[in-house]
Image: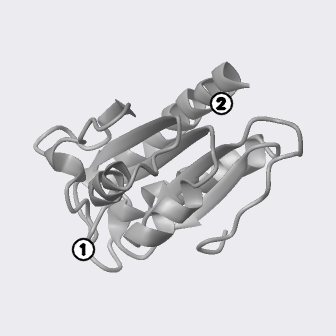
Amino acid sequence: MAAHAHREARPGLRRVVVIGVGNPLRGDDALGMMVAERVSVRRPDVEVVAHRGDVLDLCEAWNGAELAVVVDAIASNEAPGTIRRFDVRGASPLDAPFRGSTHAFGVGDAVALACAVSALPPRLVVYGVVGSCFDLGHPVDSAVVRAVDELVERILVECDAHA
């Protein structure tokens, strides 16, 4: 799936978008792209965006959605593959693992910007999976790979609950 590629939701339905953030060439940072690809295959009725992490583009990707689910790899002291879920409501800030993410500016920065300009979707759920290595050319950690299937299932439940 190419960066910024997406599929439009069917007319008349609530707009739900799943945004996988990451870089497939940087080890565990490939997680978001992997999840986006699998959700796209499993749920062709859900808009899916593979995203490289630019703050303004990320805000644009969830613009107009009633539910946006964002997935990104995070750096943390927790075990690789640990899944963290944040339900962002109003001006609720994301905690430290999303500040800067594994990118120069990350999901936390996009949420803060969207809060500042009142541009958050009505529901925004952010999933972070703890990674261990984000080096260029490094393979994805096996614990992160194992987390992908569980995360896809969780995201599909989020989408179904919102339908």
- Nearest the camera: 24 or 3? 3
Q: Is residue 111 above or below residue 149?
A: below
Q: Position of residue 40 (x, y in %)?
A: 72, 51
Residue at the far left: name it. 77
Mark earlier in primary sequence (1, 2): 1
Q: In the rendered view, how is the structure colored?
A: one colour
Which amino acid type corresponds to the residue marked 1 in the rendered image? Ala
**Taking 68 as reference, is 61 above or below it?**
below
Q: Is residue 10 above or below residue 5?
A: above
For the point 82% across and 36% down, the residue is: 13
Specify the label residue 141 is tagged with.
none
Residue position marked by numbered label 1 in the rendering: 104
Measuring 28% from the left and 53% from the top, which residue is drawn there? 112
What is the secondary structure assignment of the residue under circle 2? helix
Percent position (x, y) of residue 17? 64, 47
Q: Which residue appears at 41% of the width and 49% of the height?
A: 118
Q: In the rendered image, which quarter is residue 30 located in?
A: bottom left
Mark 1 crowdedness (10 Å alpha carbons): few <14, some 14-19, many ≥20: few
Distance from the alpha carbon under mark 1 to that under mark 2: 29 Å
Q: Neighbour class for label 2 at 10 Å: few (<14), some, many (≥20)? A: some
In the figure, is residue 15 to the left or right of 113? right
- Quadrant in which residue 78 is drawn: top left
The residue at which mark 2 appears reads as: 159
Q: Is residue 101 left or right of residue 63?
A: left
- Quadrant housing the C terminus: top right
Provide the secondary structure element on which disc 1 rests.
loop
Number of numbered discs overlaid on the protein picture: 2
- Can residue 138 be seen here? yes
Residue type pointed to by label 2: Cys
